[in-house]
Amino acid sequence: MPVVMSLLNSYAGLAAAATGFVLSNNVLIIAGTLDGFSGFILSILMCRAMNRSMTNVLFGAFGSVAISAASDGQEGAMREVSLEDVAVQLAYANQVVFVPGYGMATAQAQHIVRELADILEKRGVSVKYAIHPVAGRMPGHMNVLLAEANVPYSSLYELEQINPDFPSTDVAVVIGANDVVNPDARDNPNSPIAGMPILEVDRARSVVVLKRGKGKGFSGLENPLFFKPVTGMLYGDAKDSLTKLVQAVQHV
Ligand code: NAP
């Protein structure tokens, strides 16, 4: 949907430029052309970040029922972890990586993430934030939210920078992210998202996933990350869970 919106926006710009030619109005021509081309380039970049062609995004029935057979045969159970357990893991970690996604945006949890990061840093824990280019629902969504919470830009790491760091990360905390950490994109060539670059959190020593329940992500696919032995699920609204974690870490 965001790709379609950005494409329609670019058409509006091109239409304005065409009107400018008819009316001999240079302002309309220049502004319309800039709007049209920037919107078009943005749409292409968003498709690239999802490793999909524009045609596939527009007409590919992404997330339809047919895809479930490819990856929904997930076996095993998700392992639930307690708040106290997560607090201890975080308090005694050397390195923690926060991985925000769409759920952090809906929960408006960016400020409390920063608060937790501050507490951990005071304890000597190294804290980083892993930013996937299509996390959330618009380009730069996570950057905007974290900037609003005054997270220093130097703590944000792009996919290519942070992926080599995961094997030496003690705890990766996934905050309402799903598709952008789905290892099927890397491991399952039959997955509809095969080839999409992901944040490889499953390579961290421990993974904690904050989400409300067993809901799927934007793609509608099951996520094998949630069934891995390394992963613990902390259920609840991300903001509530983080607020409780802030309290719990202070008492460790
Ligand atoms: P996602 O795959 O949509 O997953 C979001 C997860 O957040 C859900 O599994 C949901 O699980 C959880 N959640 C929702 N509300 C929550 C809350 N209040 N507290 C805690 N968890 C909550 O998100 P993502 O990993 O960020 O991936 C983004 C997706 O959007 C990708 O598929 C991407 O291709 C697509 N997309 C992005 C853009 C862009 O420009 N950013 C553009 C087009 C498409 P529960 O329901 O169980 O809580």
Image (cartoon, grey):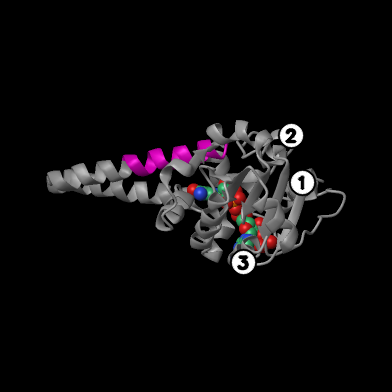
Is residue 160 shown above or below 118? above
Q: Which residue is drawn at 23% across and 45% down?
A: 17
* Residue 64 visible in the shown view: no
User: Which residue is disc 2 drawn over?
Assistant: 187
**Amino acid at pointer 1:** Pro
Name which residue type carries label 3.
Answer: Gln
Question: Which quadrant is home to the C terminus?
Answer: bottom right
Mark 2–mark 1 distance (CA, rounded to whole Å): 10 Å
Q: Where is residue 222 in the image (x, y as percent from the top left)?
A: 74, 51
- Queried whether the magenta region covers residue 48, the answer comes back as yes
What is the distance, in whole Å, between disc 3 and disc 2 at their CAs?
38 Å
In percent of width and height, residue 129 lies at 53, 45
Q: How crowded is mark 3: few (under 14 residues within 10 Å), some or many (20 or more)?
A: few
Q: Residue 224 carries which label?
A: 1
Give the residues drawn in magenta, as a range: 37-51
Q: Can residue 198 be seen in this view?
A: yes
In this picture, residue 225 sits left or right of residue 103: right
Q: Mark 3 vs mark 1: give the one in front.
A: 3
Write the residue at 36% across / 51% down: 9
Q: Which secondary structure, mark 2?
A: helix
Q: What element carries label 3?
A: helix
* Residue that badge 3 annotates: 247
Judging depth in this view, the residue of 46 and 213 nearest the camera is: 213
